[in-house]
Image (cartoon, helix red, strand yellow):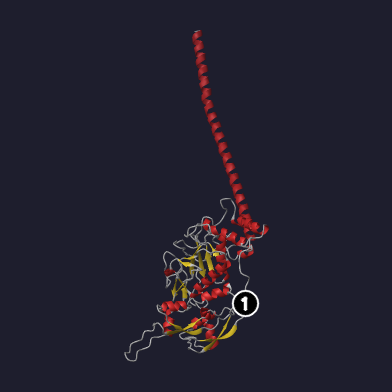
Amino acid sequence: MPILRDLRAWCLLAALGIGVAVAAEPEVAVAAGSSKKSRSTSKKKKASTTKKSSASSKGKSAGSAKSSSSAKPQLRPAEGPVAVAGEGDDEAEGEAGEDEAGADEGGKTPEQEQAEIDAEFDGGAPAEPVEAEPPPPPVDNTPRWVEHEVIPYENVEAVAGRYGVSVKEIVKWNKLDPKKPRLRSGKTIKIKAKNPPPPREKIEYEIQKGDNWEKIAGAHGVDVKTLKRWNPAKKDKKTGKQKPVMIAGKSLRIWVEPAILGGGSGDAGSGPPSAEAEGRLLAAKVRGNAISIGTPTQGRLVNGVVFPELPDLYTLRKPEQSFGSSHTVKTAVQAINAFRRGSRYSRELVIGAVSLARGGRFRPHKSHQSGRDIDIRLPIRASVEHKNAPSPGEVDWRATWKLIEAFVATGEVQYIFLEYRLQKSLYKAARAAGVPAKDLAAVIQWPRPAKSNNGIVRHAKGHTSHIHVRVKCGPAESKCESGR
């Protein structure tokens, strides 16, 4: 019996132990759930606090950005030409390049780089002087009245272009019919112009063996059509047929610029002409009736004139693609001549695409349609042996700046396209040449963003081995449009 009594006691104790264990499990579960809930609530509180903090910091940042942007002048987005293609490329004008904005690989912004360059040239030793001519004497730009003698087959548009005035002004000054203004050969008309050119002179040219219409016209700065009209074929009284005109020993009458004859640049024996006078002499050989119509991306060329052969100034990569308006070609000839005279650069300067003879679509280019766009290969350093298109490290940036400076000085350039990341090298070269930083703001877009509407030198992707010069519409080109 005692044994039975002990067994009952042990069973009772075992039952009580199991009950306690089972009862404890829910408490543990509840405690665990409570702990998880507590941690979840804590996380939510932290997340809420973080969001509030982030929102607060964003609000402060936005407020700071607003206050800082209001203190600085806003840069306008570029509204320059859209679709200017380079030599052999078809990239759209204004497309962002890799280095167009923000910090560079070293963590510096373009503005910081500019400050370092300016400090180098403003606070250090004076820049090396650049070889240049003494400034020319001041020119009297006061308009004055002159009399112009009309030559055979000359029209009002040609006279307007010659003097840099409008057709409407000539019609008004001379009381011509505004609907059909006609000029009579040998008569004189009144013109009010700045720096009027000297009158053309009539000469008798003796035809030489081997001459032809094109050769004679090119040598005297006139177009073939006009030369033939000045010297029409005469009929043989016996046969009734037209006699040939181009016979060696016979004479042709030609109205030429005094510059063609070697005059108009000063007194004899006064020494070599200045760069400006020499440029005018060369430009006088360019035929004057080539007209740009429309925009560079939707335009055409009337009576297109090819760049004259001037090997001392430049080389034409493809003459059949080197047609432009008279105003464009004359501007380029004068600018390149000034560049040659004002720099030490003696290597070849290559002119690439300009326009086709009649303008219009010129693949693969998106512009170059109206005779106002000129691709010019960047000057190459003297140590570079090849004559191909240069890489950025092979470019003579000092000479490149002098070339761009010469074009800008004409006052007839609308844009010069060069990829943004290369404009820093151009800026530094200009500072090294002694140009003040304040003067470069109107010329070079850098360090302002690549899409900003600043400077004559603008970003255009793909323009790394050449510059793309766009000349303004000429004074006599009434149907020419600046375009975008």
How many marks do you count on the picture? 1
In the rendered structure, the answer to whether residue 54 lies left or right of residue 227 reads right
Front one among 219 and 136: 219
Judge the density around disc 1: few (<14), some (14-19), many (≥20) Cα neighbours within 10 Å: few
In the rendered structure, the answer to whether residue 318 lies left or right of residue 170 reads left
* Residue 183 x, y percent position in the rendering: 48, 87
Front one among 170 and 21: 170
Front one among 74 and 2: 74
For residue 456, say whether it is visible: no
- Indicate whether 182 appears above or below 38: below
* Residue 296 x, y percent position in the rendering: 47, 69
Label 1 sits on a secondary structure element that is loop
> Which residue, as the protein is rendered here, is positioned at the far left?
239
Q: Residue at x 56, y 70 (%)?
A: 338
* Residue 150 x, y percent position in the rendering: 50, 86
In the rendered structure, the answer to whether residue 434 lies left or right of residue 359 reads right
* Residue 460 x, y percent position in the rendering: 50, 62
Disc 1 designates what residue?
139
For residue 393, say whether it is visible: yes
Q: Residue at x 62, y 55 (%)?
A: 112
- Indicate whether 188 appears above or below 430: below
The residue under label 1 is which amino acid type? Val
